[in-house]
Structure formats: C-alpha cells, structure tokens
Image (spheres, helix red, strand yellow):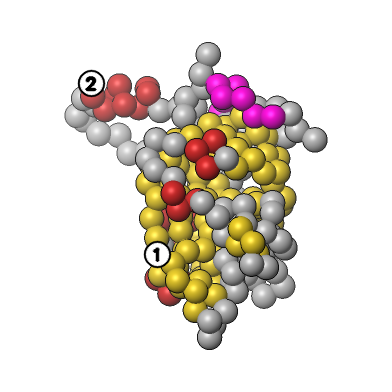
Amino acid sequence: MAAPIRTGEARRPPHRAVRLIVFGIVLGVVLGVAVIDYLEPEVIHQVSVTRAPDRASAQAEQAQPAVMSRSRPVQLAIPAIDVTSRLIRLGLNADGSMQVPPKGFPAGWFTGAPAPGQRGPAVIVGHVDWAGRPGVFARLHTLVSGDLIMVRRADGTVARFRVSTVRSFDKDAFPTDLVYGNQARAVLRLITCGGSFDRQRHSYRKNVIVFAELLPASG
C-alpha cells in the first residue's frame, strides 16, 4: 500500500508531448464517459519568426512547472473535501466506451490518457453515489479555485495540482475538447455526475468536471 500523501513532496522529470483525439461520447448509467483513441507522441515542428519574444512571455514560459515522466497513479488526496482514495486502472469496454469504477469507492484513472503529471490531460473518474450511499466524489462539486489535489504515483513522486475551475455540463453537451483536448501543460480533470436525477433514464442529468493544473515542485 502506498504511503500517505504529504503536501510538497514531488519530483518533476521531463516528458514528451502527447496528442489525444476524441472520437465520441458514450454516456454511462451513473457516470458520463467518453470514447477516445490515444495516439503515440508526435514531433511538433516550430516556425521561426523575426520578432523576438517579449520579456513577459519569456518569464511566463520559465514559470511553467516541469512535466513528469509517465508513472501509474496509485492514490488520490483532496484535503478540502476529506477525500483519500486509492486509484484503480480503467480501460475501454468492448464497445469502445471508457470503463467506470465498479463501486462507489475507489476512484479510477483512465489509462488511455496521460498519467497525472505528464504533459496533457490526465483523467480520474469516480461516482457521486452508489446504492443509495455517497460515493468517493460525493462532494466534488463543492471544490473551488485554489483547492489542492495530490496524486501519489508508483515511482514515489507526488503530482500536486491546483483547482482552476469547477463546472457543470449537461450530459448531452459533454465538453469533449475541454476535457480530452491536446494540452501543452500537465493538467488534471476529475469527473463525476451531478444535477438532478432522471428516474426514467436512471441517470444524473449533468456531469461535474474539475479542471486543475500542475504546480511546480516545492522545496
């Protein structure tokens, strides 16, 4: 079992960019999910320009936290909502839809996307409830900008993220590009259900999505 996560514990080795192409959305009974195909990294060719970069842009680029190499996430901690959960691995079902956790606990990491700390959008999903009881992400909707999310990885490092925004979307208008689109930085998306419950469809009407960005290594 992984040791408890402690704030400020992290290392940041570099990693190459990845490209994620989303083919469609498949909605789950309890948790909205997406059908995607994850492609191998490719080289991005840069075009030279005659104008020198301005000082503000150069400083902003230097301030970007270094991305981390790929390592399986094993534990998630969200202090603001008292969540500590091990992470299971989620792949694709036979029909191409993304798997969801089999119960209300624990949360799961989608292995077809980057690992938390890698360049690109890492995706962790969890249930808001299960069999009439609160799930691991029951209070996810209460997070606010600035809250911390920490992910312990199999290599012993901790990827620390800061929440930038929390948004709610209708399940028939899932923001595929915002969640799974290509990113130059290391970002994290936490996804669960929200809104009112549709008793006819046996599903919640919305998805709650937390958007977070990797913090620089501390210490």
Residue 55 got which mark? Answer: 2
Is 217 positioned to the left or the right of 54 in the image?
right
Q: Is residue 167 visible?
A: yes
Residue drawn at x 35%, y 27% as measured from the top left: 61
The kind of residue tagged 1 is Phe
Q: Position of residue 189 (x, y in %)?
A: 50, 49
Q: Is residue 34 visible?
A: no
Residue 160 got which mark? Answer: none
Camera-side residue: 3 or 134? 134
What count of labels does the image hold?
A: 2
Is 2 positioned to the left or the right of 181 in the image?
right
The kind of residue tagged 2 is Arg
Q: Mostly what secondary structure, the magenta segment?
A: loop
Residue drawn at x 64%, y 71% as measured from the top left: 96
Determine the image quadrant of residue 112. bottom right
The verdict on residue 7 being magenta is yes
- From the image, which quarter does the N terminus lie in? top right
**64 vs 190: above or below:** above
Q: Which residue is mark 1?
A: 169
Find the distance from the CA under tag 1 to the CA under tag 2. Answer: 38 Å
> At numbered mark 2, what does the secondary structure look like: helix, strand or loop?
helix
Q: Which residues are magenta?
A: 4-14
Camera-side residue: 11 or 201? 201
The residue positioned farthest toward the bottom in the image shown: 200
The verdict on residue 107 being magenta is no
Residue drawn at x 37%, y 22% as measured from the top left: 62
Q: Position of residue 126 (x, y in %)?
A: 60, 56
Name the front one of labels 1 and 2.
1
Q: Do the residues under discs 1 and 2 have CB atoms within 8 angstroms? A: no
